[in-house]
Image: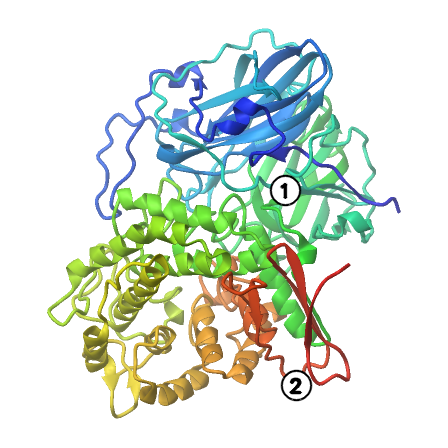
Amino acid sequence: MAPCFCLLIGKYIMGENMGEEVKKNESWDARWLTIPEFADAVPLNLFHKEQVQPSVEGRKTAEFQNVHVFVRGYFTLERAQKIFCKITADDHYKAYLDGAFMGEGPAAAYHTKYYYNVLELGTLAAGEHVLALHLYYQGLVNRVWNSGDLRFAFAAELWDEKGKEIPVSFCFLKTDCYEGETVGYETQFLENFDSRKYPYGWKNTGFDADGWEKPVPAVWADYTLTKQPTEMLSYMEYQLGTIKLHAGNEHPLEPTKLHSDAVQPLEPAKLEHKCADHNGHIHQITPSVIRQDPDGSMLLDAGEEITGMILLTAEGKDGDQVKLFYGEELDETGSVRYDMRCNCCYREIWTLADGRCEFDPYDYKGFRYVKIVPDGGVKLSDIRFLVRHYPMDESLCELKTEEKTLENIFQICKNAVRLGTQENYVDCPTREKGQYLGDAVVTAHAQVLLTGKTDMLLKCIDQFAQTARVCPGLLAVAPGGLMQEIADFSLLYSQLLLLYYRFTGEKETVDRYYGIADGILKHFSQYAREDGLLEQVADKWNLVDWPENLRDGYDFPLTRPVVALGCHNVINALYIGAMETQNTLAEICGREMPYQTKEIKKAYRNAFYREKTGLLADSETSSHASLHSNVYAMYFHLLPKADEQKILTFMEQKGFSCGVMLSYFVLRVFAERGQYDTVYELLVNEGEHGWVNMLREGATTCFEAWGKDQKWNTSLCHPWASAPVPILIEEIAGVHIDAAEKDGYYWTPHIPEKIREFRLCVPVKGKKIIVEKKMGEEYAVIREDKE
């Protein structure tokens, strides 16, 4: 077997090795271009409170949805030189240089702080070159992009390393070769791809673009641009028999095509692809053919859940079709469940032109299995899986132990975080593809530990801060055009700031967002009654937990869009907890303590504590005590210590009588109080509410709920269930990242005696720290990796 290799597809520039003019400018006064249909657009203001629908008149809809545009930018170099590209587009671009894929972007953002990318194109030879862009305007109002607002434009400028701009001449073609219905919550369009309408070769030099039009100035462009603060996506391509890896954004591009022109025969055998040593940091999948039928159809298995697309070549006659069915699981007949339980029906049709055609999908999906059904006489070849996500060096954070259940739990959570960190923290890569504030509390904690990077976390903090323009109490999802509000999530915003400070020690960053966090509390204070407790927080969804059947019988009507009259527990626990966190942030920033919480804690106890049971009830008129009503109070230390033991006993009895997100807080409550045996037992519990149940049901990424049938539309890749990552690293292995410590961490291991072998590595301040307990040894040791 030939060794795999790594093809680096461009470099995202953060301020070094670039033209002086490019280097010194964070902002960019770009020359925005568009197509004539959008030239006279008046951008729509889609910002609004969730319960106050916007009055948008004359809104263009269907004809300005699912718009694909191919752009060719010609430029000529008189000599060989290193070239840089500033580039952005709304909604999105994919960039190619002389046919080679360079990257895509920008990360979704609001137009008031829109992102651009800087690509290092490498040293190009003298002569003519083509910068090709595949632009996309989705036109839907959802959680993915800020679209549907009639802002469709792009800007691209080329510079040499001395800061001199290289002239570029653009032309474009609007294409209808991509058509399809929407899936999910109006999340994406299916891509029924018609090769008869696709101008093959348009990305390369030498293509005849006769008849293509010239783009026009987007005079309406009202963007404020800033350089994207995060790395661009990485890509890995897998093929049966060979493997090609694209983990870009690290080194200059060499002029090599992304996809090989060689047609590889499909081999119906499961082959393992092991990287060469220098590629060991890239996650590996093992794609295989499950079944190949006499009619030419085949069932493929990526080996695990992936985020990306299938690529293939077909040869047939004009009008022949290839049907593609994608799914996260197989149905009872052993075929792909393409009408997925997560509310996405992934069924697409590819129509061929005469001869050899290549399938060129645009948007990504979350899936594991693909069934390909060609018409008779169609020959398939060169089938590949292309996987995409935010870069993650797999070798930096790994767990190995003889307790394989624990190791597998860690791995499915790590996989979900890797795939769920795209250009932001997505809740799932299928139904919504949105960055939810509450989900991010768990996902960001895991992602920062797994990668040692905080850039995505800071972008997340900043983008939610920007939603204060809509409501000082913030939105629940950002960015995106969908205006959704969840009270619980807003009150957890300060947890992200505290996490960021713990990992970086950057007081100035905390201070910059301090007012945003305080504004949330001031917003909720409008619902405070005389004793300070909140009553009927009516402008946002009071969630408590999700789905509803995992609320442990919470005894209060959480009606939507307006919650019922009355005073309930969870919203008040989160409110007081946010006050306590704000006091901590004030101390970090050297500010005066803003909140005196002694009296409101008394009011909370008086309203919800039941002396008879020693537990906290769900509302001030209820005697029912759910797990939820007790967890947050314990997490934020809202009760006297004398009250805690009965609640801890109750929580231990309850286990995970909750959704997967709350498990993060449950585990941290026990860990903070030194009950590490309980933490471990909960992690590996074999009941229906636990990660072992996900493994029993075939999980390769952690689920949205504890089991496939525990929610009506369960996503099988949902990183809000990734609590085991931070819990295993911090509470079991004992590596607590703390920028205030000399080495960037402190160590307090609590590896159970029953675990005889344990090895976990974690990145800390550019180093890899290893916690290891070897067979036959009583104690674990910690060391810096010198390999």
Q: Which mark is residue 488?
A: none
Indicate left or right for 334 with 591 as reference: right
Nearer the viewer's eye, disc 1 or disc 2?
Answer: 2
Task: Give the residue at x 66% y 31%.
Answer: 359
Q: Pick the residue in front: 223 or 21.
A: 21
Mark 2 residue crowding within 10 angstroms, few (<14) / some (14–19) / many (20+): few
In this view, which residue lies farthest toward the right? 1
Please say whether residue 134 is visible from this viewpoint. Answer: no
Q: Is residue 375 above or below residue 277?
A: above
Instruction: Residue at 47% x, 69% y: name it.
Output: 664
Marker disc for residue 234: 1
Left or right, residue 231 beside residue 458? right
Left or right for 215, reference 487: right
Q: Residue at x 41, y 82 (%)?
A: 651
- Label 1 element class: strand
Instruction: Give above or below for 738 relative to 267.
Output: below
| Residue found at x 30% / y 84% | 640
**Does residue 677 show up?**
yes
In x, y percent, where is residue 323?
64, 38
- Quadrant (top left, top right, bottom left, bottom right) of the C terminus: bottom right
Q: Which label is found at residue 753?
A: 2
Q: Which of the two residues, 597 or 282, is positioned nearer the viewer here?
A: 597
